[in-house]
Image: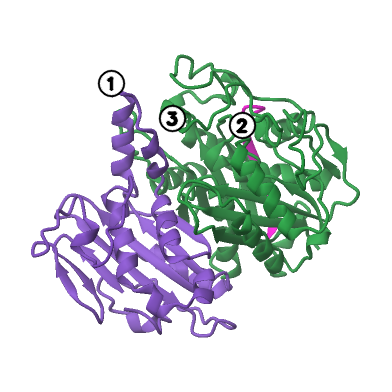
Chain colours: A green, B purple
Amino acid sequence: MDGAIHVAGRGAVASLGGSAAEVLDAVFAGAVGIRPFERLAGTDCLTDVAAEVRRADLPADPDDLPFALAVQAGREALADRRDSALVLASTKADMGGILHPGDGLGQGIRLARRVAVALGLTGEVAAVSCACASGLAALAHAGRMLRAGRARRVLVVGTDGLTPFVLRGFSGLLALARDACRPFDRARQGLSLGEGAGAILLSADAAESLGFALLGWGESNDANHVTGPSRDGAGLALAVERALRRAAVAAETIDYVHLHGTGTPYNDAMEDKALARVFAAPPPASGSKGQLGHTLGAAAVLESLVALEALARGTAPGNAGLDEPEPGGFLDLRRDRAPLPRARHALKLAAGFGGINAAVVFGRSS
Amino acid sequence: MAHLDARELRVRGGEKTSLADAGVDPLSLRWKAFFQGPNRDFRRLDATSRAFVILAEALDLARCLDAGARDDTALVLASATGCLAADLRFQASLDAPAGPEPALFPYTLPSTSLGEIAVRHGLRGPTLCLSVREGDESAGVDAALDLLAAGDAAAAVVLLGDWCPPGKTRAAALLLTARDPDTPEPVSVRDARPFGLDHADRLATPCRT
């Protein structure tokens, strides 16, 4: 063991495919998974588009979607390994009992334990619910478990399924774009919701590494407003600084930033300000919510896979929906994918209700 | 440390407040029943979330943590029911004649109470919300100790428990601080019973209440 935290497995299922390779190929090809409602047709809300998992990729029981998606993504990441802890990230988990008869009651730990049993996992099980930053909070929690020696492997799975509860909730807040979202575009109107699961297997064993490592994480709270982001970006910048410090890397060595990029006016503006606080010059950056939608508890894990793939390919994916960036912004965003001048380190950001901010740094396993 | 159950709010080294004597309805938990000063708005927080906000207030963080320390103080919550009451209320509002209650939606996340506490007390460290099995609140203490041991925070406010109908109510708050911010000493509390504080002296808590 070299003390590093290696990325040893990956898995995904989302609107753009039923495996990590399929989803990532589609993201880098610029495909958009935000489509007219299928399963959710007839839901009374501001939009009729979302990034639903395709019918062909759906499990038999769509009411059990978070469970089925988590198992599918987790199984792909594990590749028959069983000696692993599990940290599950989800905002609503299993809603049975709230939406319809059942006893799920939104309890993340119940869902996590079911996933662990289905995957045959033998280690500790934890469930994290930190709003839209759940995935990065789960990665940080897993990193601490590995650093403390409480596990040799930790499978981090982020999962959430779309329901009328969530759609109408965001719609009521006027946070949804009527059409597919356009993060960082000057005409952006809000977010598009999505569903799916992402899985990353972290290991203390360098022999299992896929070539990349979780170098550091940083978390903060805005302590400013319960639902709205801090307008000056100071909280997210603090999370980024903490992540860089833990990773022992300088900001100028970050070669790619994967943005939280929801497409809401305030979030995108805040994120731009946050990065202006940390970086002397705008780094190559893009976000995936214009393609995958905002997958809530799955988002940061799925999007971390995109960040890792950007390093692997030496390419930054484009920013779907970006026609004209906000004038006066710090970031220099491109609609189309572009080669990265260097691919040493990637930074992934996330923020959520409750003023929660998180950032992680990925790099190459030494 | 502060402990709230269906009968009273107990603060270690401070006063006890009987819920019955204060005329507190356990399902509503009015602010003024516990604290002097201006009435604080709970907004749409459900009873469990309100209990956590009350407990955080009872810790008297202003006395224990200066402004610099609060920048580096984490919030950790471990609960089985989380914000279930808010979930059920929002779900019911979807079918109501007036439609969904939009202002309630953000409160259907169990971590929102932590955001409320962060705002009230200026806590800018990590925020971690765990779903745990009933009775497994020590997982929250373990997570907080991991945070301190990793150097991710210099202190942690830990909120544990659930607030269900009277008879199944219990919640507690702990303030944990690292013995030495530069070299935090990890302490194992896997067998700790936080509500009884049988192993409280094993925790690195120079400022516990």
**Which residue is the site of mark 3?**
A172
Q: Position of residue A239 (x, y in %)?
A: 62, 60
For numbered disc 2, what is the local secondary structure? Answer: loop
Decide whether residue A318 is among the magenta residues. no
Q: Is residue B27 left or right of residue A20?
A: left
- Residue at point 46%, 54% (across, down): A125
In terms of secondary structure, what is the magenta stretch mainly?
strand
For numbered disc 3, what is the local secondary structure? Answer: helix
Q: Position of residue B72 (x, y in %)?
A: 54, 71
* Residues at marks 1 and 2, CA–CA distance in whole angstroms: 30 Å
* Residues at marks 1 and 3, CA–CA distance in whole angstroms: 15 Å
Q: Are marks 3 and 2 on the same chain?
A: yes
**Which residue is the site of mark 2?**
A293
Report the span colored magenta: A5-17
Q: Around disc 1, counting alpha carbons within 10 Å, would you say few (fewer than 14), some (14 to 19), or many (20 or more)?
A: few
Quarter occupied by the N terminus of chain A: bottom right
**Which residue is the site of mark 1?**
B97
